[in-house]
Image (cartoon, coloured by chain):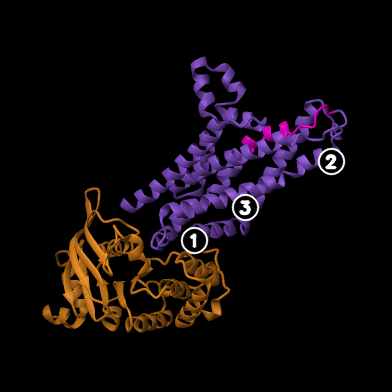
Chain colours: A orange, B purple
Amino acid sequence: MIDVKDLWKSYGSFHAVVGITFSVARGEVVGFLGPNGAGKSTTMKILTGSLLPTAGSVKVAGFDVVENSLEARRRIGYLPEHTPLYADMTVKEHLNFAASLRGMSSGRAKERIDAVVSQTDLGPKWRAPVKTLSKGYRQRLGIAQALLHEPELLILDEPTVGLDPNQVVPVREIIRGVGRERTVILCSHILSEVEATCGRALIINEGRIVADGTPRDLASGLGVATLEEAFRRLTAAGGAA
Amino acid sequence: MGPISTIFWKEFRGFVTSPLAYIFLILFLLWLGVNYFFGNIAAGGSFTGVQVKEASLESLFQALPSAFVIIVPALAMRLWPDEIKLGTLELLMTFPVRPWQVVFGKFLAGLALIAAALALTLVTPLTVQAYARTSHGLDWGPVWGSYAASLLLGGAFLSVGLFAGALCREQVTAFIVALFTCGMLVMLGTSAFLIQSADWFSDIARQISFTVRFESMARGVLDIRDLVYFASFTGLFLFLNVVTLEARKAS
């Protein structure tokens, strides 16, 4: 589903992503872990076509994200970090806008919007302007929008950051539900979340992949009990903190 | 046409649901109305039109470039900076649309609003027509020429405003940059400026500036060179806008 080969992204002399290579098979739910500034979001932006790589090749569903960007983008649903949304639109307008921009016919748009609204339980906020939504509902709208066109690949960048525990649970349940039928990449630094939802974890640090495996294997391979300890062991600079 | 019309309607709805657009629309009409009123009195006419020898709208369109210099950048400034600041640009770029489609959709939405503002000024020529004491009434040739010239001028200013917005994160910065650029392009061609500058410079200024071309079109003189100038100026700035978006991705 995803094929990343020797991917680089540099800003001047700073290298955000340093030659990473990985692939994700269809149907996998992969946690993309790393400390802040490790290159997670940069990699996701490249996968989704909003940023161009400096070097290397990235294929999504067989389509190169640079050469065949539109075809790749048609197959991806994306929830960017911080969930950017148009504040002046209502939930209804926002989903209609997304459907229209994806070129859906009005019949299909209606059918899919109904489906994602019930899937993310947005019904009560249907006519609410986005600027009045709580963070939990904003997140649900972001996910609903990402699921609208039944993408083969769903990429969620920190979907539960800033949510209170009552809001986290439904969002996590949505992710788990989607993971049963689609390929999902979940960027997060909440390790329990990755342990609970992902069959595989990739740990990235300073632009490099430092570990790849099931959360359980990663922990036992390093002789530690939890993914959290493995994460700290692999990413803490010089053993500090 | 799909993505372009989606973007068009999003931006157009954004205009008509924001109070700012109405404020600028009212100020625009006031500015033109006041200028027309005093312009005609100063020219020796009277408000009832009895003493006006010729039913003319010249003073209406004389005030138009100066009004557009302020109004158009103010309308254009909301098209990009918020998208950049709030991160919706990133979201937009992950939809299967091409940057030029987004730019063009935004441009058309702004142009539609400018056209609507111009349509509201039709009240003036219609009034003049109704009160004109001349045998033929109003000569509509120059009037339509003036409207065409106004729309071209508005489109050119809009492309500058859009480009400024794509470079800036703040609306105010985008507004000021566009205001100065458009202001310079108008000022360069005013007779006061042309008279006091050296010959070689006023020749160049005459070519670059919008004012001379606008005034000749507003008199009803349709010169293909003026059309080409406005079209290529607007096209260039829209193209630069697309380039900016592409460069942002590569940065």
Q: Which residue lies at the image location 57% right of the left edge and 50% below the top edge? A: B110
Q: Which residue is mark 1?
A: B2
Q: Which mark is residue B20?
A: 3
Q: Which residue lies at the image location 32% right of the left edge and 65% below the top edge? A: A72
Q: Amino acid at mark 2?
A: Ala
Q: Dot 1: what SS?
A: helix
Q: Earlier in the sequence, mark 1 or mark 3?
A: 1
Q: Nearer the viewer, mark 1 or mark 3?
A: 1
Evaluate if marks 1 and 2 touch, with contact meaning CB atoms under 8 Å apart.
no
Q: Which residue is mark 2?
A: B130
Q: Amino acid at mark 1?
A: Gly
Counting from the top left corner in percent of width and height, residue B44 is at: 81, 25
* CA distance for labels 1 and 3: 28 Å
* CA distance for labels 2 and 3: 33 Å
Mark 2 belongs to chain? B
Q: Residues within 10 Å of mark 1 (few under 14, many from 20)?
A: some
